[in-house]
Image (cartoon, grey):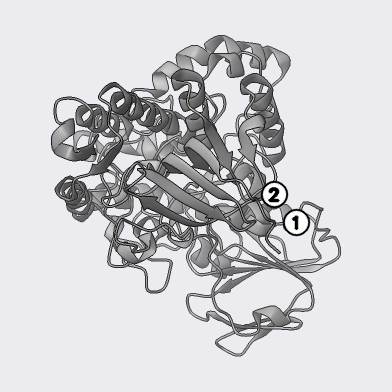
Amino acid sequence: MAREHEDVLELDVLVVGAGFSGIYTLHRLRNELGLNVKIIDAGSNLGGTWHWNTYPGARVDCPAPTYAFGIEEIWKTWKWSQRYPAQKEFEAYFDHVDKVLSIRKDCIFNSRVVSASFDPATAKWAIETDDGRKIKTQYFVPAVGFAAKQHIPAWKGLESFQGVIHHSSLWPREHVDVRGKRVAVIGTGSTGVQIIQEWAKEAAETTVFQRTPNFCLPMDQETFDEASQDAMLADTEAEFARCQTTVQGLSRPSPTKSYSEMSAEECDQILNEYYDKGGFRLWSGAYNDLLVNPEANRATYDLWAKRTRARIDDPVKRDLLAPLEPPHPFGTKRPSLEQGYFEQFNKPNVHLVDTNTHPVIEITPSGIVTSDNKTYEVDIIAIATGFDAGTGSLSTMGIRDLQGVDLGERWREGVTTFLGLTVPGFPNMFLPYSVQAPTPFSNGPIFIEHQANFIRDIIKKMKAEDLRTIDPQPAAAQAWRDQIVAVSKMTLFPQAKSWYMGANIPGKPVELLYFIAGVPTYRAACEDSIGEKFQGLFICQK
């Protein structure tokens, strides 16, 4: 039952979401502009994705120390235990962030936005929540990220299962004990891979339901001793500086050569070197035309398949996990970083079901049925079927435009934004770490800082010029969309059925949902828009 909150909360800025983007935005606007800012979050604590995703093996795939806030007071007083920290460490990290920045005092937890509409007469957003709160705010910042709305296929009998069943993003806080149990993992995206690696070590039987193989890359994990931590801390400022100039916001330099500029020997050497070194090097660092040149892409895939197949004993599993013919171009689906993932399938009690040939059609009280009428009896099921990425969470918050049309309806035929941050007809609304921006092709916190700075700068400009509202020009938004669509057609992304393209959700328009030209190019576009072109790109009202 909704609680009653009699008073309307009056704010300058309401931020939805207490993850990296929400915290960055609150800090910038509260501490630097002196605005009255609150965060509202459906969860019970800070962290965003690192609060919700407590499934076994949950771990980041961007390396420390730069998958973190670049605020000196924070990083100077924190030491990471591993290159790729686990979820529990991020919980402790966000506690540390709060001690430094005092974020929680301006947060409202366990409250979900269900309605948001803009009143032109007052130039304010009217927000309502599921617990009866009413909020009025000049600026509205849904900072819910790109992977907040889980996707669960509409399997027959899903509610009938008598064992333990959880979606990866709705995992319980208490430990799920799989020792001596028959377990199933449906899905082999990043969460599926991480769960499988953990469960296969303990469960009596592990059955993996795979539709598409994950082109996993070795995680170059390292546990830091005190000397390593001190060395990292001494270099952290320089590491953050290096991240500002690269395409993905990682500290490694972006590749400068194309595939055709390299000899066969040079190509083979660098591909093997990057596979051995691990991390995303093979995806992001070998040559600069991986995602546009089919020949370059196939060379990378063939090397990956050769190295991966050598790790898999069973020929049937080998052909499913690392087929000789790629089911899609390499890197057009996000590869996961793994720690012994493929070796788990060499165990006799780890089984692999090809759901591309025989999809799951039903969940029974005791197991899973595939289209060939085979039943797999299990005790515990992990649903790792991913998210309605990019648009999903934004389309279910009841956000309406000036004509009362829901944002989800506005985007029903395709996404249109300006800079991936503003949407025509939704004045004074900003969408950090969302669609039509470099979001999933970036080191999240590095990129988020750029967007938070831009939101700060645009509000600062509005204050200086006495503007009550800004709303992107429809023509500017259409041009931004057209640019993303045009670039997409020049790449290999449309050849993959991926969440990058929205193709994992039935009925969703298939289109590239993100800006792939890199963080520096995106940042330059934002900076350009706030200069002399500002009045032509935004409808401004005093």
Q: Residue furthest top?
A: 234
Q: Position of residue 321 (x, y in %)?
A: 52, 62
**Above-or-below relation of 128 to 98:** below
On the rendered structure, is 121 left or right of 324?
Answer: left
Q: Position of residue 464 (x, y in %)?
A: 29, 21
Residue at screen point 76% across, 82% down? 366
Q: Position of residue 216 (x, y in %)?
A: 51, 50
Residue in the foreground of this view, choosing between 152 and 333: 152
On the rendered structure, is 344 left or right of 524?
Answer: right
Mark yes or no: residue 146 visible.
no
Q: Residue furthest bottom?
A: 373
Position of the C terminus, as image quadrant, is: top left
- Would you say the residues marked 1 and 2 are in contact, meaning their CB atoms lie under 8 Å apart? yes
Residue at screen point 28% across, 60% down? 494
Badge 2 marks a residue whose secondary structure is: loop
Identify residue for label 1: 172
**Above-or-below relation of 332 to 228:** below
Mark yes or no: residue 492 visible.
yes
**Above-or-below relation of 350 to 25:** below
Q: Position of residue 163 (x, y in %)?
A: 79, 74
Marks 1 and 2, Cα distance to the nearest angstrom? 7 Å
Position of the N terminus, as image quadrant, is: bottom right
Badge 1 marks a residue whose secondary structure is: loop
Residue in the foreground of this view, choosing between 533 and 204: 533
Q: Which mark is first along the chain, 2 or 1?
A: 2
Q: Residue furthest right?
A: 180
Identify residue for label 2: 54
Q: Residues within 10 Å of mark 2 (few under 14, many from 20)?
A: many
Q: Residues within 10 Å of mark 1 (few under 14, many from 20)?
A: some
Q: Which amino acid type is shown beneath numbered disc 2? A: Thr
